[in-house]
Image (tube, rainbow, N blue to C red):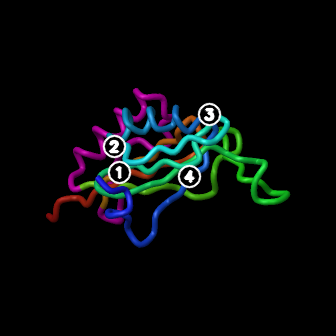
Amino acid sequence: MDSQSNIQPITPYLTVRGAADAIALYQKAFGAKENTRMPAKDGKRLMHAALTINGGTIMLSDEFPEFCGDEGTLAPSPEKPAAVAVSITYGTPAEVDATFHRAVEAGCKATTQPQDMFFGMRFATVNDPFGHRWMLAAPLPQR
């Protein structure tokens, strides 16, 4: 699969410490499929990777503090998480529950247990060990 052919108009790009480990966790937790992996020249970090999760694309890389001037490209951490979240929308509430439990088993921290919300969605959140928050949602059946 060409990693550029299924990119949606807005694509999250995550910076992590340990991109290869993050990919492995995202495969277990969210069923991610790896499309692209570009190692950095140091042979230790990943310069770029693209994954498909639930039909959407996310991209990620290791942090590179030596780039981007004084600010660098720094990753969040569990102690100082990212200010934004990645949201995954599923077709059914059962998919939210299954993904939530798989993510917790894979090493994510449960932050909002799956529940039916007033805004008509089954909703849950987890934080991954790399400092990123994931929101899981699916529309509730119409009554």
Total tally of numbered discs in the picture: 4
Residue visible at 41% across and 41% down in the picture: 113
Asked if residue 10 lies left or right of residue 129, the reply is: left
Secondary structure beneath disc 2? Answer: strand
Alpha carbon separation for disc pair 1 and 3: 24 Å
Alpha carbon separation for disc pair 2 and 3: 22 Å
**Residue at far front of view:** 41
Residue pointed to by mark 1:
52
Residue visible at 38% across and 64% down in the picture: 7
Image marks 1 and 2: residues in contact by CB distance under 8 Å: yes
Asked if residue 91 lies left or right of residue 75, the reply is: left
Mark 2 is on which residue type? Lys
Residue 25 placement (x, y as % from top left):
45, 33
Residue numbers of the magenta segment: 91-120
Residue pointed to by mark 2:
33
Secondary structure beneath disc 4? Answer: strand
Residue 85 placement (x, y as % from top left):
52, 55
Q: Which mark is residue 43?
A: 3
Alpha carbon separation for disc pair 4 and 1: 13 Å
Secondary structure beneath disc 3? Answer: loop
